[in-house]
Amino acid sequence: MNAAPASPPKTWPVYGHTWAVHLLQQTLTTEAAPSLRRVGPSHAYLFLGIQQVGKTTLARAFATALLCTAGRTTPCGHCRACMLMARGSHPDFHLVQPTNKDGAVDRDGGELRAERANDLVHDAALRPLEGQWRIFLIQDMHLANASFSNKILKTLEEPPPQTILLLTATDRKRVLPTIASRCQVLELRPLDRPTVAQALLASGQANAEEADLLARLANGRMGWALEQAQHPERRSERLTQLATLRRLLDANRIDRLDFAASLVSKRERDNRELFGMLGLWTTWWRDVMLVQAGCDDAVSNADQLDELHRQAAVLDSRQVRAALQTLQQIDGYLHHTVNARLALEVLMLKLPKMEGSRS
Ligand SMILES: [Zn+2]
């Protein structure tokens, strides 16, 4: 991405999660510090944490450090292995992602499927082509179907000597216990607001005001904040989604059901946008509650204080709490249930009404 620096980088390209970086560094061979006798990497790691908190970024950085040939605990950025990793074409690094039925990557509604596990088990038994390790990064293990899990369990039980599996998942409860117990587990917590804001500023992709707002909205998800900073059009998308919510609060039953129907067809095309909107609405209701409690400083949607105050004054706190609970319930249903239409209709009909606001 950037031009090669004159001196090697001093840290991993990871924001926050310092303890995890240190822990992983201790497993690396280093010529510079022979006193640090290496224990060597485990054959499997499970990175846990909410979406876009940095699990894949950390796992990739670890893979690069393992494959880097410079013999340091930080990837050098210059060697052939580092270059290939940066281009995403190292022959000993394999990315395994959930897909939809047509085989396209789908990290919201897709699955890790048996066919992919067959390839993985086969490839994992082969020796590395270039480096010391053959590394598999399996994203979203919580989306693995039963046969995928059972197949890779074999590889975890009898790991080929030069194979390392890096798994990510949002929730340990959604990973087969027999799998989690065979991995070293690293649980990444959401980053605090100042860390996210400083990282955005340092990246040069946001000014101080934008960095503050994005850090508030990010809820500790560095990846989300960076993505928003890199795509300014997402910000107008957010304002549109908030305007939609505002409109729905005034809308009648028929309009709300129409909107639910439009969401159902949207879901078929783009899951991510729908879940993004539900996530945004969740932060919105939390903010209304915070304003009702007199905690204006803590809100995420800091650029919308006037509207938050208007709604906080009109709606009573039980309505707001109920709206938040419904959203969380529906979000859960949409990840599991087949009847999306029913779930979305319930969501729309249960939204509070703002009629009282009309003067
Ligand atoms: Zn290197």
Image (cartoon, rainbow, N blue to C red):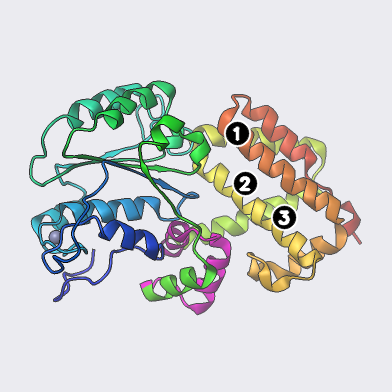
Q: Which mark is residue 334?
A: 1
Residue identifier under label 3: 285
Q: Which mark is residue 275?
A: none
Q: Secondary structure at mark 3?
A: helix
Query: In the figure, residue 145 lies in which quadrant?
Result: top left
Instruction: Determine the residue positioned at 8% across, 40% down.
Output: 129
Which residue type carries mark 3? Trp
Q: Looking at this view, is 217 or 294 the one in front?
A: 294
Instruction: Determine the residue positioned at 16% across, 69% down.
Output: 4
Span shown in magenta: 203-230
Residue identifier under label 2: 278
Rounded to the nearest angstrom, the CA distance separating label 2 from label 3 is 11 Å
Q: Earlier in the sequence, mark 1 or mark 3?
A: 3
Question: Is 150 rendered above or below residue 169?
Answer: above
Question: Is 313 rendered above or below residue 113?
Answer: below
**Is 145 displayed left or right of 321 in the figure?**
left
Residue 311 appears at what percent x and percent y?
A: 80, 60
Residue at the extreme bottom: 208
Which residue type carries mark 1? Leu
Could you classify mark 1 by the number of other residues whose Cα lies within 10 Å: few (under 14), some (14-19), or many (20 or more)?
many
Instruction: Determine the residue positioned at 37% across, 41% down.
Output: 139
